[in-house]
Amino acid sequence: MNILQINSSVRADASHSSRLANEVVQRLLVANPDASLKLRDLGRTPQPMLDEAALQALFTPAEQRSAEQAARVALDDALIAEIQAADTLVLAAPMYNFAIPVQLKNWIDAISRAQVTFRYTANGPEGLLTGKKAYVVLTRGGVHLNMPSDTQTPYLQTFLAFLGISDVEFVYAEGLAMGADAEQAAFAAATRQIQQLIAA
């Protein structure tokens, strides 16, 4: 098993989402002793955002790209290669202002490439990253699950399915900013979820 862990919090070692993603990964490693892990921390090493220069580089034939364009495309190529090689994706996504962090959105833009990770057919879009399992850890200061304010779950579910990843498990830790007792209860509930999902 090749595990790809994507952390997207800007809080570094204080990140709640990274802490729980680490728990998921540790249980996966215990259950699969021969597994390998690739960790990409987008908070510490952000992917540049998609802008006009990046689009021009992507749409320029490889043999015609400038050195600067080739270097920009290579940054996205590296992320695509990581997720192509992964059997299991562990995605850590805190809620920032009712959405995913911009760092995670930049990663999503980087790995979404037509004819590489998805393609359009006469029957509609087809994801090319099939056969993978994903665990998505969502951490929130408030409580949003099954409410209109939960924009993360449907967005990430739709995005992953678009790329062909439909076997997705969500782990939630909510109410983390609602006092020490609520935070403790949230972590305990999330840990129970993780234990139920992954038999170590």
Image (spheres, rainbow, N blue to C red):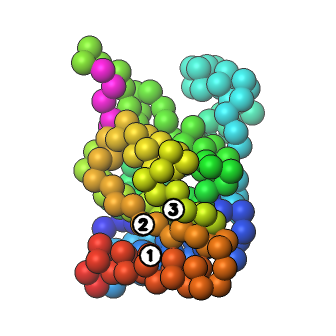
Q: In the figure, is residue 31 to the left or right of 11?
A: left
**Residue 90 picture quarter:** bottom left
Tell me, yes or no, whether the highlighted magenta stretch contains residue 156. Answer: no
Residue contact between numbered discs 1 and 2, judged by CB atoms under 8 Å = yes
Tell me if mark 1 has few (under 14), some (14-19) or many (20+) residues whose alpha carbon lies within 10 angstroms of its own: many
Residue at position x 61%, y 73% in the image? 176
Q: Is residue 108 visible?
A: yes
Tell me if mark 2 has few (under 14), some (14-19) or many (20+) residues whose alpha carbon lies within 10 angstroms of its own: many
Pointer 1 residue: 190
Q: Is residue 28 visible?
A: no
Pointer 2 residue: 171
State whether residue 82 is above or below residue 51.
below
Question: What span is colored magenta in the figure?
Answer: 124-129
Quarter that holds the N terminus: bottom left
Q: CA distance from mark 1 to mark 2?
A: 6 Å
Pointer 3 residue: 138
Find the residue positioned furthest to the top: 122
Residue contact between numbered discs 2 and 3, judged by CB atoms under 8 Å = yes
Residue 79 screen position, x and y as percent: 53, 49
The kind of residue on which mark 3 rests is Leu
State whether residue 116 is above or below residue 196.
above
